[in-house]
Image (tube, rainbow, N blue to C red):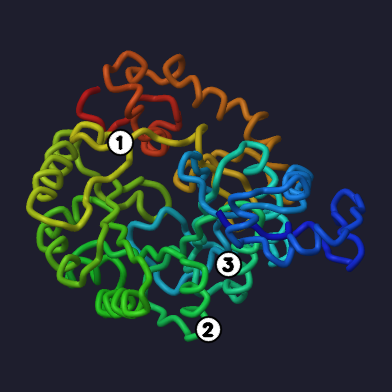
Amino acid sequence: MSYKLSRDVIDLGQYLMNVKTGELYEVEQDGRMLLSNLNTLEYLFNKSDIFNFMFNEGLLVDSSEKKDRNKFLLQLHLLNDCNLKCLHCYDWKDPVTSLTFEQNLVVLDNFVVFLKKMEMDGEISFTGGETLLYYRLIELIDYTKSQDVYIKPYVLTNGTIPPKTELLECLIRNDVGVQISIDGTEMVHDEIRGTGNYYKAVNGIKTYLAAGLKVSVHYVIMRRNIKAIPEFIREMERLEVKRINFSSLVPIGPGAQEEMLTPNENHDVIESIAFLQKEHSISLLSTRPLWSAVGSSGFCPVGYTTLTIDPSGKFLPCRRLPIILGDARYDTFFRVWFGSEFLQKMREREKYIKICGTCIKANVCGGCRAIAYALTNDAFAPDPSCWCV
């Protein structure tokens, strides 16, 4: 546990003030001593009445991770700009009016209120576009980690932009996870993302690993790159990457021109990766729908533990499921989470999802709603990539 004065509280010397409620608390000698010795054994294991009072009033908070709590993931798209034009991208990267830095701070404040009320810890994926093009990323990460609840930050990047020293220092001090997108061995990846970008992404991996950061790689499975998977796994293991996150192509945006696998091919690729897991120490099994077929946990978290906000501030169920649920400039997380008819149906998906509701794996999978929506315009249609349909 790590106790600290709440960021909503200012110390006025004789008094503490909660700046959100206006409450004023007189601080006597015992209270002042406690504030000076918050994390000593005496106060950590022998909590006094004054400690309990201050904690219950929200003056003191514990922002350390709670292992027994569920985590809620917010995927926050900071911008739509990107330095690459990948063939399988789900977004045309058209110019948009992105949320300002100050509006993103408000989003984070609202997220914290939501987490407190839900009694959950948080995870936040900062993404884009290309995340490293966001001009105030360091400030945003520092602000995230200053909050009164535990939030684990991640930065999602294509890895081609070398991080500046100041950014690396920020990532280290805030224990930020880094995910780099690579979609095959050098020839295949460069075919998808542009000549020379595999080499840049690998150098990015080496830089982040050398700084002591945890690095994972994201691989989008499509017909163009399925044969590269075994060698790609070996290459990532040689680099000492600990995890590859596999996902399936969602055919929207420019990516609609790329070829998906047939359901049977999808099954074979997932099974082959599960077989390769036995030969490798690197973690390979995805937690996405359909992967429950190989013993992984693949239930889609939409409606349960995740929300997305796109660069313009629109709430979405997930970035590849472009159904607008609200607007972060006006709507709170509570209004979207509890007021959305779509999310309510997702929580009762056994009633609404065709086929999946009667499938024996419905409760541990449910199919990919983004792929269903992309191909049928119905998020509750059978997953066209599923071999059980």
Quarter placement of the C terminus: top left
Residue at coordinates 13% horizontally, 49% vertically from top-left? 277
Q: Is residue 37 left or right of residue 160?
A: right
Q: How far, Cα to Cα, is label 2 from label 3? A: 12 Å
* Callouts 2 and 3 close, C-beta under 8 Å: no
Mark 2 is surrounded, within 10 Å at the Cα level, by few (under 14), some (14 to 19) or many (20 or more) other residues, namely few
Precedes in sequence: disc 1 or disc 2: 2
**Image position, residue 164 (x, y; %):** 47, 85
- 31 left or right of 4? right
CA gap, disc 1 to disc 2? 37 Å
Q: Looking at the picture, which amino acid does disc 1 mark?
A: Ser
In the structure shown, which secondary structural element does the residue marked by tag 2 occupy?
helix
Name the amino acid, label 3: Ile
List x then y, in percent, for residue 333. 67, 41
- The residue wearing badge 3 is 141
Dot 1 surroundings within 10 Å: few (below 14), some, or many (20 or more)? Answer: some
Residue under the image location 51 percent in, 41 percent down: 306
Looking at marks 3 and 1 on the same chain, the residue that comes earlier in the sequence is marked by 3
What is the residue that sits farthest to the bottom in this orientation?
165
User: Whole-percent x and y of residue 382?
Assistant: 34, 25
- In the displayed structure, would residue 91 be above or below residue 57? below
The quarter of the displayed image where residue 190 is located: bottom left
Relative horizontal placement of residue 197, taking residue 315 as reference (left or right): left
Q: Position of residue 384 (x, y in %)?
A: 29, 31
Query: In the figure, 60 relative to 235: above or below?
Result: above
Query: What is the C-alpha distance between the residues marked 3 and 1?
Result: 29 Å
Compared to 68, does 97 lie above or below? below
